Amino acid sequence: MNKTITFEPLISIIIPVYNGENYLKDAIDSALNQTYKNIEVVVVNDGSIDNTEEIAKSYGDTIRYFKKENGGVATALNLAIKESKGEYISWLSHDDLYMENKIEKQVEKLKALENRNSIIFSNSILFYPDGREVLCNVRNSGYIFDNKESIITLLFSSGLHGCSLLIPKAAFKKCGYFDENLKTTQDYDLWFKFIKCGYPFVLVDDYLVRGRQHEMQDTRAKVDLCFYERQKLFINAYKMLLFDLLFMKKDNFKIVKRILTELKLKCYYKLLKFIRVTTGRL
């Protein structure tokens, strides 16, 4: 008689934090309170000068804690990944929250897939200090983004919350880690690298992450830097994926146009459009 093979991989929830005394406890609690129990929580203190260390150490052996000199969120993420013991990595920002079944739902999805070397993600909820909430549904043309066009569309639509991803640790070894020179777009930069390496993105169509919106976020506190890095990101993505963009369907191509226009990169859109027109693709 064949025994049922269980699939309960160790999941490393990594939490990079810098001066996170206001929100860190809530983040750690949401990680420890997961219904899926085969987890480890890895907290990396990126040189905080507030009470972050005291809060982290109050959890004792229930978490793994590391402290380093300040170098930016990418450096903290990379250290956490390298120190983690799990087969899969789940990033949680110190000011965001997981729904209690976040990991369970995503492991269930992995278990049902033939290719468990996939990146799992979900929808998210943005919440504000005044109590407002915004539901963020990832634009999709199907639940499995297993070709370059669908994944490119997903990333260009900017609907993907980084903390919703569950990533095979092997993907980092194959594709590389977060770019430590980037301060606000290190996540999307890496997602594009995953595309280039051929990793499929698979959607769990549930709201599994709550993203806190506040004035101290880098995307708000460093607006000019964020805009510059986004421009650079999409230029690099444009160059890397030019061939795939050339053959993209019209509806998805409209998303590329909108994003490039918003980023004041109309010249790239015009060039791409010219190529598509001359080759009969538009």
Image (cartoon, rainbow, N blue to C red):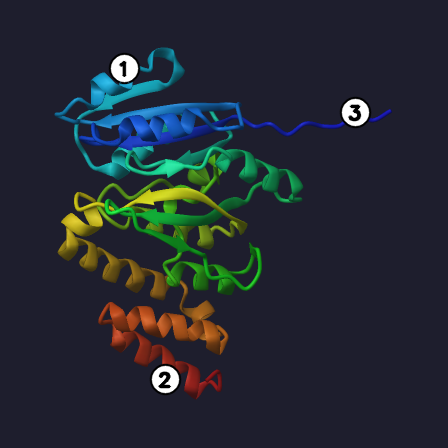
Q: For this view, does 183 lie left or right of residue 138? A: left
Classify the position of the N terminus by image quarter.
top right
**Of the residues shown, which amino acid type is indicated by label 1?**
Lys
- Residue where numbered disc 2 is placed: 274
**Of the residues shown, which amino acid type is indicated by label 3?**
Lys
Q: For this view, does 185 lie left or right of residue 106? A: left
- Residue where numbered disc 1 is placed: 57
Q: For this view, does 72 lie left or right of residue 25? A: left
Relative to 26, say whether 254 is above or below: below
> Where is residue 47 drawn, in percent x and y?
17, 27
Q: Nearer the viewer, mark 1 or mark 2?
A: 1
SS assignment at label 2: helix
Q: Nearer the viewer, mark 3 or mark 1?
A: 1
- Quarter of the image where one finds residue 179: top left
Cα separation, mark 1 vs mark 2, equals 58 Å
In the image, what residue occupies the spot 46% across and 68% down? 244
Residue reaching furthest to the front? 131
Cα separation, mark 3 vs mark 1, equals 42 Å
Q: Earlier in the sequence, mark 1 or mark 2?
A: 1
Q: Are marks 1 and 2 in contact (CB under 8 Å)?
A: no
Who is closer to the viewer here, 128 or 29?
128
Q: Earlier in the sequence, mark 3 or mark 1?
A: 3
- Quarter of the image where one finds residue 267: bottom left
Q: Are marks 3 and 2 in contact (CB under 8 Å)?
A: no
Relative to 203, say whether 245 is above or below: below
